[in-house]
Amino acid sequence: MKFKINNRFRAVLGCLLAVGLLFSTPSFAFQQDSLAQDTAVSATADTVDEGEADTAATGVVADTTAADGEAATATTTTSSSSSSSSTVVDEGSQIDPQVYKNMTYYILLFLIVCTVVAVVGKVLAIYELTRKMNGKYNPFANNTFQSVLLVIFLVAFLGFVYYGYAVWGDWAWRSAVTEHGERIDTMFIITTVIITIVLVLVHILLLTFPYIYRMRKGTKAYYYPHNDTIEKIWTIVPAVVLTVLVLFGFFTWRSITNVPEDLQKSAIQVEVLGEQFQWQIRYPGADGVIGKRNYKMTTPMNSYGIDFNDKHAWDDIQASDIVIPVNKSVRFHIISKDIIHSFYIPDFRVQINAVPGMTNYFQFTPTMTTEDMREKMNDPKYDFVMLCNKICGSGHYNMQKKVVVVTEEEYKEWLSTQNKYFTEDLQKEFAAVDSGDSKEFTTASLN
Amino acid sequence: MSSTVISHGAAHHDAHDHHQETFLTKYIFSQDHKMIAKQFLITGIVMAVFAMLLSILFRIQLAWPDTDFPILEVFLGKWAEGGRIKPEFFLSLVTIHGTMMVFFVLTAGLSGTFSNLLIPYQLGARDMASPLMNMLSYWFFFTACVIMVASFFVESGPASAGWTIYPPLSSVPTSIPGSGLGMTLWLISMTLFIASQVLGGVNYISTVLNMRTKGMDLWKMPLTIWAFFLTAIVGLLSFPVLVSAVVLLFFDRSVGTSFYLSDLVVQGEILPNEGGSPILFQHLFWFLGHPEVYIVVMPALGLTSEIISTNSRKPIFGYHAMVYSLVGITVLSFIVWGHHMFVTGMNPFLGGVFMITTLIIAVPSAVKAFNYIATLWRGNIRFTPAMMFAIGMVSFFVSGGLTGLYLGNAALDINLHDTYFVVAHFHLVMGSASIFGMLAGVYHWYPKMFGRMMDTKLGYLHFWLTFIGAYLVFFPMHFMGIDGVPRRYYTFTAFPFMDKWISVNLLITWAAIIAGLAQVAFLWNFFASIWKGKKATQNPWNSNTLEWTTPVEHIHGNWPGEIPTVYRWPYDYSKPGHDTDFIPQTVPFSETMSSNLPHDFEGNEEAIRIQNEWNKENNREIIEG
């Protein structure tokens, strides 16, 4: 078969050209430019301070100086004192030669380990060879050895699982402090018991059978291709167990998510808006109704984008923390300003995503105040925390809001001290826009 | 090349032997399934090493959040200024690690390698139905890999919106630098990759359906082939949906459409997009995304079935049940995707429905696990490195699969969604289990691929370090998740309740580093054995399947003479009455009169009559016709 390589190259080059053209379209160019600027701004001239660098064997710890003045002097000293081995990586930052030395040590260390492994391998090979020459070689010795290792692994594994449950499980487990969370916890524990039993039993069988039925001299396998009864049993038993779990889970899920309409209305309403990388909280104020939000009305002053044409919005309250009364049903309206975030309070067993363009709801009743929780945890600083649980950018790891559960009196008192969103400045701005006719809005909605 | 091979017989074929083969046609633009399998495997291994290095980088950040590692700056430049990885780059690392591992290693590297190698071999075909498409499949995949790696050399960095690339994060470049050019490259790479998968899938399915040798009916196919066949069907039906998702995202990013975007104020700028829904993308993505995990794990299950049976010297227990459970998984895998979206704001009732279907899919998986254990029972087990990895695979499949009962349960998922619990779950059940299935396959079929044996001692070393390492890495993560530690967090230092987990992170990172270094044992073993390994015999594992009837030296068209005929199922190990503990599929029943059983004849009265005559002569029990 002839290979028409030229034609293919032509095709490939054509494709490359097409891709190149695609990249040079204005939208791409714009994206790249703006990004390049961003990175240029964020690139600070961090410098490794040579004087600080230790020659300790661990030596990877080298201090960096962020202060510009110091960095400038450090740069001059490093460039004068360091030999040619230091490489310029980025403008203004140089790598301490010690770093390369340390790296070399680690590589050498690894090579030594490799050599030891190779030597041990050779010794074993020679040992085997001598056994063979003496006629004492047992071809099944390694087989037995590996099966014994599997049994040892089983013991270690079970111990490890126990350690995990006992120590890490203890660290991880805090009972839920909401009404629905307690039901979730019950189900969690039931599921844990079931799967732990299965996990342990299956591993005992899986790792002891290899030892019991290992190949030895003269052993033979039992030809046993199938047994319909056994197979039916282990299809039906998991099916039944799962049906129970499914029904249990299904009704719990429905009871959490399917709140009757009158309860929805009688609950305290709180709106939470996620944005990179913070949360904003809005309480409905005296009228109990959260005012409308229109993202197109977002201005530097009205960063929430509240639509003050809606009179319900005038008394909306701004809060720095989420404060809710104990034993009262609270309905959270979760929205997002930019990208997807997730409203997650681990202690409450509460999570729902904040999705731009739609409102999600989660209604729950906390059963313990922060004070009581601190007492229970024996930690005077303990706080419930709401955190972002959907990847949202560089600040994702620190997008949190304190959640405080208080008694009802404290709640009312707190609420009365909070500020409104519709500040005087905003009122002025709103009035100016309003008097400037609704032209602006009609054009805005056309966009 | 192929059409000639198939149409004219072996005799004619021998006459002019090989076509003129240059280096280019033999090793680069090869259309031979064996060579393409090796290409897939080696590319997959390279990608795996790359993705593993990325994971070590972010593990270092998680274990020592307050320490500088100036050496990182040497390699990463501005992404690790002052020796500390930046948050944006951390997200890029997890994104590309996930993408490469899921798509390039566990999809292409696993099913690409072994489907190509074993489908023609185990079915008795001279090559794939369309060798040209097969070649294209590899080259699309290779290009996808190159583009993905190339995104590391882009000014604004590689894609960093997570491997699930949820918009708007992935579609608005101002929200994260990685959503600039890096994301575009990600989308192009993925489109090429899907083209590769579709080309491959069509090929696998048509080969399995049309090119089986004489006697190889569907119920005589090894479980590996069943697994590859069903995997290809799943892939063919689900991957195109990802293309549509990717193309629409591409439009949103570059053309200004609003399929997924609405009501956005990013960094103070009001965007003009209106009317789209980010949830739409999630539906489209997970319609592939969930079947994808079965695309990843089913070939591993197939390989494991074959290896466990061969090395237990015992038929696989419940062959039919194994096939039906694979079919069950295949069908159900299409109606469970919503369990990734319980808390995204999807209609809660729909969530309840998806929860029911999700937990049903646990049943066929449980059947498979139990059948493996029943296969070991009263076997005559030989611990080759491949067998060790197969046992490890079952262990991971069970321990990872069980935690699926929490996550599939919508009510429990509220608290576990997107936490480390999820990370632990899928790294065990689809990550570790599939990698172990793949490694088991590599150790087992290495003699078939390269004609040489791998070193067993290094194999054991590799197995133990990896097996223990993987458990040490992933098991503790469950507890972090229960505590409510979200995944993809750059550091745990911002929350007081996460402080206690930093010590555990240290353990995890050290385990990951050691397990990572253990892979050097594998790489050395793999590449050195290609030239220096012990020469393999034709059937080193005394296996029944057809690939071991081909000569050790690879020849064009696989079998020098006629393609062998198949007479029996592939699992006649240790059949009572036979002198050896295996009977290859090519041995007719007339040669094994002493070991034939009633069900072997499938109601063929003439055969039963002949057998009964022989039984009478040899004082054996008479079969009831």
Image: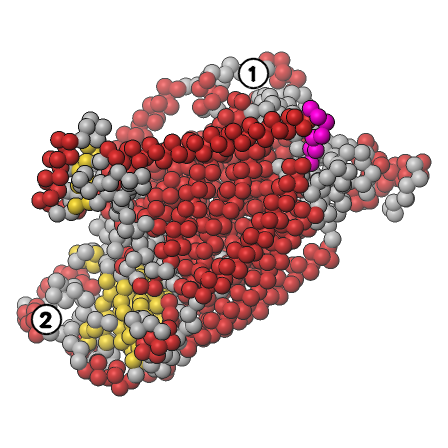
The residue that appears at 60% across and 49% down in the rendered structure is A152
Against A105, residue B158 (above or below) is below
Q: Which residue is mark 2?
A: A426
Percent across and percent down for residue B563 are: 67, 26
Q: Quadrant of residue B399?
A: bottom right
The boundaries of the magenta stretch are: A133-140
Q: Is residue A358 visible?
A: no
Against B197, residue A315 (above or below) is below
Q: Secondary structure at mark 2?
A: helix
Q: Is residue A143 visible?
A: yes
Q: Chain of mark 2?
A: A
Asked if the residue at tag 1 contacts the one at tag 2, i.e. Cβ–Cβ closer than 8 Å, the answer is no
The residue that appears at 45% across and 58% down in the rendered structure is B478
Q: Chain of mark 1?
A: B
Query: Is disc 1 on the same chain as disc 2?
Result: no
The residue that appears at 38% across and 40% down in the rendered structure is B53
Q: Secondary structure at mark 1?
A: loop
Image position of A135 (left or right of A288): right
Q: Which mark is residue A335?
A: none
Q: Please, what is the three-letter code of the amino acid marked with disc 1? A: His
Q: Give the label, 2 or 1, closer to the camera.
A: 2
The residue that appears at 52% across and 55% down in the rendered structure is A160
Against B248, residue B457 (above or below) is above
Q: Nearer the viewer, residue B429 or B507?
A: B507
Question: How many other residues sit within 10 Å of disc 2, few (<14), some (14-19) or many (≥20)?
Answer: some
Against B511, residue A111 (above or below) is above
Image position of A276 (left or right of A237): left
Percent across and percent down for residue A264 are: 35, 79
Percent across and percent down for residue A99 are: 27, 36
Q: Which residue is mark 1?
A: B18
> Disc 2 and disc 1: Cα gap in Å?
83 Å
Q: Please, what is the three-letter code of the amino acid marked with disc 2? A: Leu
